[in-house]
Image (spheres, grey):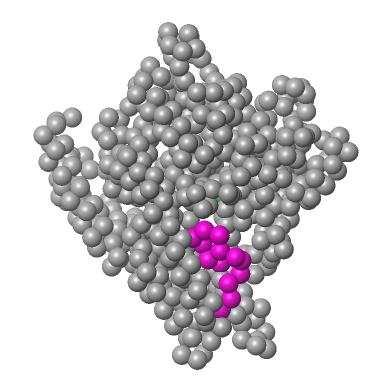
Amino acid sequence: MDAEQLREQAHKMVDFIADYYKTIENLPVLSQVEPGYLGKLLPDSAPNHPEPLQEILSDVQEKILPGVTHWQSPNYFAYFPSNSSIAGFLGEMLSAGLNILGFSWITSPAATELEMIVLDWVAKAFQLPHHFYSTGQGGGVIQGTASEAVLVVLLAARDKILRRVGKSALSKLVMYASDQTHSSLLKASQIGGLNPELCRSLRTDPSTNYALSPDALCEAISNDIASGLIPFFLCATVGTTSSTAVDPLPALGKIAKSNGIWFHVDAAYAGSACVCPEYRHHFNGVEEADSFNMNAHKWFLTNFDCSLLWVQDRSALIQSLSTNPEFLKNKASQGNLVIDYKDWQIPLGRRFRSLKLWMVLRLYGLEGLRNHIRSHIDLAAHFEELVRQDPRFEVITPRAFSLVCFRLLPRPNSEDDGNQLNRDLLDSVNSTGNIFITHTVLSGKHILRFVVGSPLTEERHVNGAWQILQDKASALLGNS
Ligand code: PLP
């Protein structure tokens, strides 16, 4: 590594990225390329000799960017957001610059200790109970994604119960969640070797705004116990993926506790909102959780990837995931003086991800993060109001955070139940390249989802998006 070469080339790269952000608003937010487009533009083998950076950057501009969907565009309203910020970007840059692998404390003490400190800071900001702090039996850890977070806690929960009832009971373990729970849980259960027939996906409906019903859970647990099965894991969600439903944590936690079930809370998207006192009540009941997860990389201004997981009892994780080969042994680990995060995750190697979260917390402060969340929620409320004012549309579920679920109503006496109409509307607005929104299905209805989440989004972008939706709706309904 030649430091002067790094300085020169990295400056060029920063200029390139800064220019990208300057013009991002004018780029088609949803990439409009066809599958296989890139193979036609790039050579079929790697160059034998070094090429100049300038040439590569031209290729990025001309060949790569057209195939990029611009998640940071102010006109991006799809899925859930994945925020970037200057603070997050600088932290990523520093992490890449140091390029350490902090799997054991000794491999970079600062990486482990900063992670413990910032996770304690965030736990405090969310008013999480003390048993989630690193100073107690539990603690926090940064995973890559919420999918990895739920996998590691599911493995910990599985092994914990199997230590009690015997390994042969694996095929009798039952897991509970709602039919709105993210698919990452099912994937975790497959990896964990659970019996797929015993992954209970409890039905939700509009009467509870698609939240998991404690009564349905109690009934399912009783039936399973009566059949000789072993309930062991419950996943509740604060802010489900389709409609941001909030499962009733206090009631669910009580049921889990009285049945000796591991209680995991997935707040991947909506968790960020709970840094604001007015949204913190959504976490009420988290005291009973064995594990709790939120993605700082979704809505907390921290560049991907940065998924925060807290556990009440870290020994359960460590018993499932620890390995101790000779070549990793060292005095600090052997003396049980330190945390070795390799034992809290699937891979061995791990990046210095706490740097970017630390940067975000320091460069914004908690008040800055609260302003960020509140501004998005205000914009979503504004969009919701616009939808309500147009009688051709309906809002489907009450808006809890920055997601609005809505749809275009079919014409009276039309044969279409509205599903094809809304599919057409979605295709039509996304094909403009001017905005990007996505869909879901709730109670058999094809629903459009509009999420405010890009740090660059302003009211004019929301108004512009609504104008496109209205124009395309008029064209589809034939009254343009
Ligand atoms: N849980 C919820 C509620 C989500 O909405 C998502 C993704 O949007 C996930 C989990 C999975 O997130 P990840 O991509 O971090 O695995």
Asked if residue 260 lies left or right of residue 284, the reply is right
x then y, percent, for residue 273:
49, 51
x then y, percent, for residue 422:
56, 75
User: Which residue sits at x=41%, y=19%?
Assistant: 105
Asked if residue 262 lies left or right of residue 472, the reply is right
Residue 131 forms part of the magenta stretch: no
Residue 402 forms part of the magenta stretch: yes
The correct choice, above or below, for 196 with respect to 244 in the image is above
User: Which residue sits at x=33%, y=27%?
Assistant: 100
Q: Which of 42 and 66 is in front in this view?
A: 66
User: Which residue sits at x=27%, y=51%?
Assistant: 43
Asked if residue 425 lies left or right of residue 416, the reply is left
Q: Give the range drawn in magenta.
A: 393-405
**Residue 356 visible (yes or no):** no
Q: Which of 217 and 257 is in front in this view?
A: 257
Q: Which residue lies furthest to the front in this view?
A: 277
x then y, percent, for residue 60:
25, 54
Q: Nearer the viewer, residue 315 or 473?
A: 315
The correct choice, above or below, for 139 with respect to 423 in the image is above
Q: Residue furthest right?
A: 226
User: Which residue sits at x=51%, y=84%?
Assistant: 476
Asked if residue 208 lies left or right of residue 41, the reply is right
